[in-house]
Amino acid sequence: MSRGLLSLRAWRDPILVAISLVALWQVLHEIAGDSAVTAPAPTLSHLWEMIGQTRFLPHLRETGLAFLQALAIAFGGGVLLGVVLGGHKLTGEVAEPILVALYSIPKITLYPVILLLFGLGMPAKVAFGALHGIIPVVLFTMNAVRNVNRTYLRAGRAMRLSPAQTGWHILVPATLPEIFSGLRIGFSLTLLGTMLGELFASQRGLGFLLMTAIDLHDVKTILAIAVLISAFAVATNAALLAIDRHLHRGAAADSSGK
Amino acid sequence: MSKAGWIRTVVLVAAVGALEIACRTGAIPATMVVAPSVMVLALVHTLQSDEIGMHLRHTLSAVAIAMSLSIVGGFIIGFILNWVPFLRRAFSPFLAAYYAIPHFAFYPLLIVIFGLGPLPLIVLATLFAMVAMILATMAGLDRVPRVLLKTARIHRLSLLQEIWRVRLPAAAPHILSGLKLAVAYSFIGVIAGEFILSTSGIGHEIAFAYDNFDNKRMYALILFVLAIVTTFNMAVFAWERRMLRRRGA
């Protein structure tokens, strides 16, 4: 199949999905009525209106800031921890089951603990988002570092590379595709964690707006915010997925050409 | 036990011990974290005295319903999508982006539609868990080795026989790991929903204790939930390992 056709299909599918989702939404609205699901067009225009309002922006900024800080901690800390755990075999073996267990528990039960430790507000949200995102980053990085082909390292030693050169020319290219997959999952989970943190005991942010909208039975706002967050998540994920596939394809070509 | 296993046990025991000492000596105030021994005592007290059984029943029944719906439904949908290439092409970009969406942002909407009660929780948890099962079923069926299917054709197996005796057993490891995820996600969905907004259930009880500064009870319940979920996950994990070993994998 030619490249051109592939890229055409790559564009066609998401557009079709988006159109069918909007159609489904419209159908749901026809069935359930205005009190449960508002129609797509009014909801989107409401969203547009909301974004223009000055009282909406501080909430958006609060959520965005919390998310970015959590993301920085999850990515930086996760890669660092993963490299350490992957580089030292015994430490990795000790830590891995603990991390996997931590990954599959409902971390929301730990949110009150985090609230007690950090107090209500931004730091608690950041900590909770980072807690969600850091584990997959650590797990993926650890596996990537563990699975570096020993032959590459031996070749590096034969060429008398300095540690810095070994890191830059061998370790980084060898581990990058795997680590990036971890970062992509970490991104989604950090967003989930930050949102969860805002839905419970928060005074600012998009999650707070969602919770106040329940009390007011303001379906339009609930849907508008949910759509805004989902659109952001899906668009970013698509971009990350494209980079991810590109990296993996490069890696596959490398290893098949050896 | 392996060396790593021993070290892990020692590390965990030491961590709990250090927390106990820090709490007893007042390095960590009781308004933040209570000592582990106090948590356990409070847990025993909680389990004996009040209506915790009712909340536990609510939570577990919602989890059980969501779990069965997502496992059975996810398996069937995954199977159909794998069987019909047209549907698969249509849905796969949607499935690939599915777990990027923070589902809990839709919980308020579910409450508005279904009212406060077990229904929005079950829907939330099923939506959260089912797609993991769909993806795992599809991945498993994709990876059935061609040679097995050819062998099945040589033996003139009927379609049902081929599915039952060749495709499903060959896909079992992937399907099992999807099942494991569906179990964990059902718990996460229900408890997180209860925690955010609900009128009963363990998650709600934890949030309620937090709101009332009842730290002892809150930590006892957190410990309880983590213990239940971890036990359940471990049981599924052990079961999966035994199944895989029996297959000689």
Image (cartoon, rainbow, N blue to C red):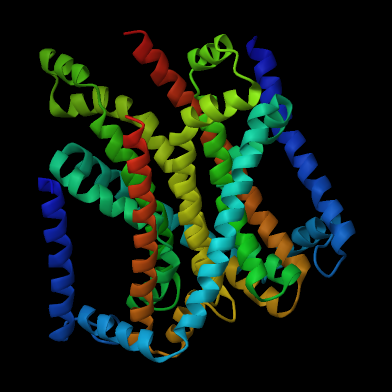
Residue in the image at 26% along x and 45% along y:
A80
Residue in the image at 19% along x and 16% along y:
A151
The vertical placement of A82 against B211, above or below, is: above
- Is any atom of residue A201 visible in this view? no
Image coords of residue B138 (percent x, y): 57, 33
The vertical placement of A37 against A202, above or below, is: above
The vertical placement of A57 against B197, above or below, is: above
Q: For residue B39, which quarter of the picture?
A: bottom left
Q: In the figure, is residue A245 to the left or right of A59?
A: left
Image coords of residue A223 (percent x, y): 73, 61
- Is any atom of residue B120 visible in this view? yes
The vertical placement of A227 against B208, above or below, is: above
Image coords of residue A74 (percent x, y): 37, 52
Residue in the image at 63% along x and 74% along y:
A211
Residue B53 or A26: which is nearer the viewer? Answer: B53
Residue in the image at 58% along x and 23% along y:
B162
Q: For residue A116, which quarter of the picture?
A: bottom left
